[in-house]
Amino acid sequence: MLDLLYRRRSIRKYKPEKLDAQTVQVLLKAALLSPSSRGFQPWQFVAVDDSEILTQLASSKKGAGFLKDAALGIVILADPSKSDVWVEDASIAATILHLTSESLGLGSCWIQIRERQFSESETAEQYVRRILYIPDNLKVASIISIGYPDQSKSPYLDGDLGFDKVHINKYGSKY
Ligand SMILES: Cc1cc2nc3c(=O)[nH]c(=O)nc-3n(C[C@H](O)[C@H](O)[C@H](O)COP(=O)(O)O)c2cc1C
C-alpha cells in the first residue's frame, strides 16, 4: 500500500486505448466498496466512456480539458437527503477510484465539480447535470478521469512528505 501511495500521481495525459469491460467493472466495484458514514452510501456513479460526452464534460470548468482524451470518466453524485456528510463520503469514493486506478496501472485525476463554475451564470454542477440528465435531488461532487497513462511522473520521496505538519500528543510538539 505505501509503495502505491508513493507512486500515485495525478495523470492528465492518456493513450487512446479504451478500458475493457472487466476493468471498468473492477473500478466500479472499488467505488461501491468505499466506506461511508453510518453505511448510508449516499452516492451514485455515472460511468462515461462515450467520447462525445467526455468532450462535453471536459468543458465543465477550467482545468478539466484533459477529460476529453480519457478512456473513462466516473462522475460522482450524492444524495444529501441520505447523509449530512455526503461530501466526505463522495470524496472517499473519489480517492478509492484514484488509488484503484493506480493499482491497475491506469492514470487518473480528480476533477472538482462542486463549488466550481462553468460560466458566470452557470455552475459546473448545473452544466454536468444538464449534459447527463441528472435529477435535481443529486449533487455532483467530482469526476475522476481515467485512462492508460501517456506521461510518467516521479514518485514522491520521503523528503516531500512535510513531517513538520505532524504533532505528537499535543499541538507544537514536533515529531
Ligand atoms: C479535492 C481535489 C480537487 C482537485 N481538482 C482538480 C481539478 O479540478 N483539476 C485537476 O487537474 N486536478 C485536480 N486535482 C488534482 C490535484 O491538482 C493534485 O492532486 C495535486 O496537484 C497534487 O499532485 P499529485 O496528485 O500528482 O500528487 C484535485 C485534487 C483534489 C484532492
Image (cartoon, helix red, strand yellow):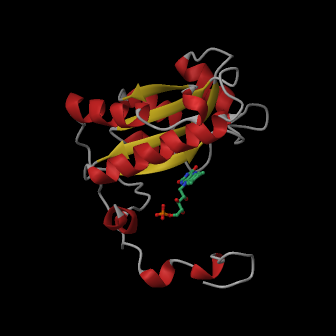
Q: Look at the image and tell me in which quarter the C terminus lies.
A: bottom right
Q: Is residue 29 above or below residue 132?
A: below
Going 25% across and 49% down the picture, which residue do you hit? Answer: 104
Ligand 1 image-quadrant field: bottom right
Q: Position of residue 5 (x, y in %)?
A: 39, 63
Corner quadrant of residue 47 = top left
Seen in the image, is 4 located left or right of residue 77? left
Look at the image and tell me whether residue 43 can be seen: yes
Q: Is residue 97 above or below residue 3?
A: above
In this view of the protein, which residue sits in the foreground, 55 or 6? 6
Going 50% across and 80% down the picture, which residue do you hit? Answer: 160
Q: Position of residue 133 (x, y in %)?
A: 56, 15
Q: Position of residue 138 (x, y in %)?
A: 64, 21
Seen in the image, is 18 located left or right of residue 53? left
Corner quadrant of residue 135 = top right
In the rendered image, the residue lying farthest to the right is: 121
In the rendered image, the residue lying farthest to the front is: 169
Q: Position of residue 45 (x, y in %)?
A: 47, 27
Q: How many marks?
A: 0
In this view of the protein, which residue sits in the foreground, 139 or 166? 166
Going 78% across and 38% down the picture, which residue do you hit? Answer: 120
Look at the image and tell me whether residue 66 can be seen: no
In this view of the protein, which residue sits in the foreground, 32 or 121? 32
